[in-house]
Amino acid sequence: MRPSGRKLDEMRPVSVDVGFTKHAEGSALIKVGDTHVLCTATIEDRVPPFIKGSGLGWVTAEYGMLPRATNTRMRREAAAGKQGGRTVEIQRLIGRSLRAGVDRVALGERQITVDCDVLQADGGTRCASITGGWIALRLAVNKLMKAGDVISDPLVPVAAVSCGIYAGQPVLDLDYPEDSEAGVDGNFIMTGTGQLIEVQMSAEGSTYSRAQMDQLMDLAEKGVGELVAVQNTATA
Amino acid sequence: MRPSGRKLDEMRPVSVDVGFTKHAEGSALIKVGDTHVLCTATIEDRVPPFIKGSGLGWVTAEYGMLPRATNTRMRREAAAGKQGGRTVEIQRLIGRSLRAGVDRVALGERQITVDCDVLQADGGTRCASITGGWIALRLAVNKLMKAGDVISDPLVPVAAVSCGIYAGQPVLDLDYPEDSEAGVDGNFIMTGTGQLIEVQMSAEGSTYSRAQMDQLMDLAEKGVGELVAVQNTATA
Amino acid sequence: MRPSGRKLDEMRPVSVDVGFTKHAEGSALIKVGDTHVLCTATIEDRVPPFIKGSGLGWVTAEYGMLPRATNTRMRREAAAGKQGGRTVEIQRLIGRSLRAGVDRVALGERQITVDCDVLQADGGTRCASITGGWIALRLAVNKLMKAGDVISDPLVPVAAVSCGIYAGQPVLDLDYPEDSEAGVDGNFIMTGTGQLIEVQMSAEGSTYSRAQMDQLMDLAEKGVGELVAVQNTATA
Amino acid sequence: MRPSGRKLDEMRPVSVDVGFTKHAEGSALIKVGDTHVLCTATIEDRVPPFIKGSGLGWVTAEYGMLPRATNTRMRREAAAGKQGGRTVEIQRLIGRSLRAGVDRVALGERQITVDCDVLQADGGTRCASITGGWIALRLAVNKLMKAGDVISDPLVPVAAVSCGIYAGQPVLDLDYPEDSEAGVDGNFIMTGTGQLIEVQMSAEGSTYSRAQMDQLMDLAEKGVGELVAVQNTATA
Amino acid sequence: MRPSGRKLDEMRPVSVDVGFTKHAEGSALIKVGDTHVLCTATIEDRVPPFIKGSGLGWVTAEYGMLPRATNTRMRREAAAGKQGGRTVEIQRLIGRSLRAGVDRVALGERQITVDCDVLQADGGTRCASITGGWIALRLAVNKLMKAGDVISDPLVPVAAVSCGIYAGQPVLDLDYPEDSEAGVDGNFIMTGTGQLIEVQMSAEGSTYSRAQMDQLMDLAEKGVGELVAVQNTATA
Amino acid sequence: MRPSGRKLDEMRPVSVDVGFTKHAEGSALIKVGDTHVLCTATIEDRVPPFIKGSGLGWVTAEYGMLPRATNTRMRREAAAGKQGGRTVEIQRLIGRSLRAGVDRVALGERQITVDCDVLQADGGTRCASITGGWIALRLAVNKLMKAGDVISDPLVPVAAVSCGIYAGQPVLDLDYPEDSEAGVDGNFIMTGTGQLIEVQMSAEGSTYSRAQMDQLMDLAEKGVGELVAVQNTATA
């Protein structure tokens, strides 16, 4: 029933290429099916003004998409002169999600910026960004711990997956053909132990029941479990 | 236990002043406790390019906050030269939520823009904007129906309420003192019959369980029910 | 002869609702006929760099109009990405006018920002903003004086009224139907004792004589006198 | 008493170099003392959308200042990414003033853009721009009349002069040292026959009486008379 | 003598991964040493207004750098709200260079946009962009020719290499450590037959003689010859 | 053969009017044929952050064109809200070129900003800006030397000329009619002793050989020699 022939609760194949670029303190190219996102983590000693002197760390994120990551070319945001609403919304979500898995006292007063740039898009770019961004963050924190700059591990695993109602059925990990048809879809961001960090489930021109919401949550738990396993392997 | 002395499942008093400004096709000043939002609905014959000629209608929203709606003065976005990420995120949510309650065929090829401007803020401005924005929309559509421009009613009621975990307890309709302390909070947008349109539940530096999510959903159902009753009275 | 049936030298009814919003140090909703402006005054300890350390205070103003304050919806300036020329011109005028009635030594090294946001427009919004903005400023300064932060009263009353030549006749306090037809119109900003602060009288596609200018000045003196009486009552 | 040694009612020397640049339909470098403004007029067949098909013409203006026209270098507005409030206010005044002297029916459905760029500033740049801009406009219209594109002369002379109260005395045509000290100053824009087009008289931290306003008007009439004579000679 | 141990006339290893992303009509990841650029070519039927209806084609380019392509993180241009001067200069060069190798009549009235996004930078990104961008362009044109939309091949090979004077010696293909030290460096863009398209040779705080210019040209001819061989192999 | 009747190696007449404006530390109006550029040099004590405390000086440049410097009116960049790509490219070239002729140690830790504003354009504005900008710089440095703030002369002469291939022939100093037709053209920036600072030679839809490049270099040497003579006379 799904365009890709996948089962309702089946994720796309996921692979991770760590160290894809050399300058960043952490970097990974994550591929969730045909969605490819390059994630890098940058450590800086400065923190935003509102936590200066607090001893707390900060994690933030930025998101971008190359103009021809998509089927038709999109206008470059730098040329347009501003980040679109969708971009801003996504990068706020990525930052918020990653921060929820960080012990900011243990991180210490420093900032890590996670850049997620979509090289190729096929649905689910924000979830792939969170899952891959966490890997870049993990690698950067490992460097801090190896150097003795951070003593106690400040991270718990964070991963994200999309779910939705496609052709009347709850499905896991929507690809673009599904995403563009689904009347209801959203994202679940969770920790490795199944605690919720963020749920965003929207209907466009449609609605859904609590029973359906529960089915989607079940799918999300399964998907996040698989993603956390991939994260563990990649950063072992 | 709540700073306001309210019970865990008790909303703030809600009042609506319809026709607060005279030019708009629909207007209402909604007060949810000390959060006051002026909502206006503007009918235009043009529609966005992507639905031109489709016969379908469109509903969109914009959101703003007066500089001194808050406890300390915020910079005016027009002076800053752009809408902040929070503003863009909120107005996209309002538009999406209202559209979910609109039969776009019945509305016909026209656009209704709902402007939500916060005159005074005390937490929950986006939910008040959706609830009040729907009233302005209702009044504007009534005008179209009275004029015979729209024959079959294209609207079902849409309302929104915030919930969160404050001091370890699930609470309904957070005011600003609660909102600024809550580690978990979010918004539930629902129809008058209890169908879900959008769920957004985020944790900042914290997480929550599925059991807690269920408790919040119960609160949200209660709150939206009360808000829809207010909407019905105000637009009767 | 006037669309509203008013006499040539008759102002629209003026009312003031002080304390309309709760966060600002001073706030007032002024209604001059169907022109409604929400004015708030914010006290801050910082001053602009060019007077730092001088011991002098500063008063500045910002102006905005809600998108549907007018008969047809105007584009939101925050969305357009800049304040239009008209907005900038008006807010500079408001700031200059209010400053002329302030003893900046007596005010002390602090800044008061007066925000004037038009909720509903029917001509004369800049004059209503000055008159109402002064009330918000008065209330904020009262707070400073009550707290002993300011000893000697730094304010003299400032109010503004528009005049113009409509259908060949000099008229006081133009509403929108008059304003859009008048070939000559402008604004008089004066103190409570009838001293001039600013005169702006422009013709668009027309001219006027010195004799006509004198007639308009007479009207303005009458109007400002009435406005100052309203200010006194509102802030008593 | 005046820093320049001029009498209270004495203007600075005024000279005009017509045809200073070759591409524009009309061009003039006007020098009012040490204030030098290059004015060009451009004729285009298109008009703004709001008068398309009306048969009426349009005159508009833009104003700029070279970065080192002033004593200390100012930031280039193109580099800053926007025109400042002062620039916008001035160019709106120039456009409005020139239009008041144009019979838009006689001009026919075309637009003339007058650019006023200050090469060197010493006070009174907006007045010099109006006076010199009118000369550029006159030359461009002469070209249209010579070509038979315009039959009846659409122009009456328009000129502008500043006046103010300096050291307690009313003075004509303020230069920069006077302008930066005067508590009251403004601009009078008039036709060649002494009719008023625009009066802008502001006090900054000061006020003035109607009697003083009358004295300034007398000075302005004298000054504009002299400027119109210079315009006539330059364009003869 | 060179930091990398290369000979004066030795290029870095060059590799090309064609079809790196799937949506674009042509795509290639080019690696010139540690400089990695993702190039995509997009075919569109529309052309810029100035050649509409001329029957001629157009090739244009855009350039970007991921924030952490460099040793320290650079601000994202989309977030900064504009493309920097360096970016604009580079993308104009890429477009001009590629166009010089295109028979615009044979291409037909269509536009090809070449996007060059630097994933990792180590000097020479603009030259790698031109060389890799030509490959993406070649692949896209091949598609047009296979489909019969273009009959006669409109392309001649175009490649680019940097040269400079490092530690007093002329060197080929500067990497970042050389580039940041060289007082004289620049770029040579040439066709496969050794004709020049563009020469840009700048000194910063230094100068060079015609004899040195000749030596650099010799190096450039050698380098471009090698790059064209790589292009041929990659697109065979 | 040339539209102007000039010989292949003949420059346009060049004249310089030093001290054209009074505020700048150095100013000159340079006329190269009908290309007229007003150049000013501003001395400031502050330097860019990256050389603060280094003892080194800095020279930078900005470039602009009045809207009607050209045959048809161009949009004012300040109104457009940004400097176009061409402007940025040119001003970076001017700054780089002038810096190459400056001994930054001898200049001392101060910044000189050279503004080049084109009053009238007829081809070759960037070369005229460099040649005239150097004169303004020379005059400003003379002032510093006379005041004893700079002891040893930090400047060597820098001038620039364009060359190109017009109608198959190499020509010196292209005017606009030649520039708009030439398939190959560029700029040579050199010192007074014939050392090269920057070479930019581009082909648009064409290519050129090394032999042709040599011919253009010969022409450039002749042209720069003549320009340096003019510079010497003007600043003697």
Image (cartoon, coloured by chain):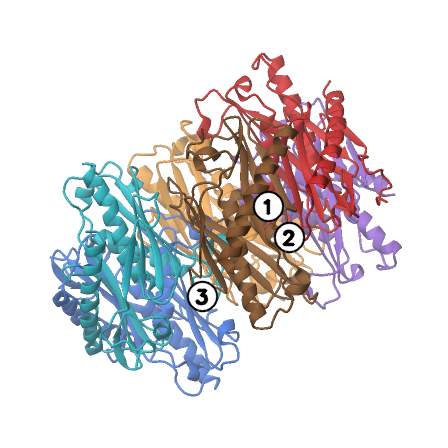
Chain colours: A cyan, B blue, C orange, D purple, E brown, F red
Report the amino acid beneath label 2: Ala
Q: Position of residue E96 (x, y in %)?
A: 61, 51
Q: Are marks 1 and 2 in contact (CB under 8 Å)?
A: yes
Circle 3 is placed at which residue position? E23
- Up the image or down, B223 lies above or below A82; here it is below
Please state which amino acid type lies under the numbered disc 1.
Answer: Ile
Counting from the top left corner in percent of width and height, residue C117 is at: 44, 55
Q: Secondary structure at mark 2?
A: loop
Q: Is residue E19 above or below residue A236?
A: below
In this rendering, would B157 be left or right of C222? left
Mark 1 vs mark 2: which is more N-terminal? 2
**Residue F120: in sight, yes or no?**
no
The residue at which mark 1 appears reads as E189
D148 relative position to D223: left or right: right
For the residue pair E208 and D85, the one nearer the viewer reads as E208
Marked residue nearer the N-terminal end (3 or 2): 3
| Mark 1: secondary structure | strand
Label 1 or label 3, whichever lies nearer to me, is 1
State left or right for residue A209 relative to residue D107: left
Residue A178 coordinates in the image, percent (x, y) = 34, 75
The quarter of the image holding the N terminus of chain E is top left
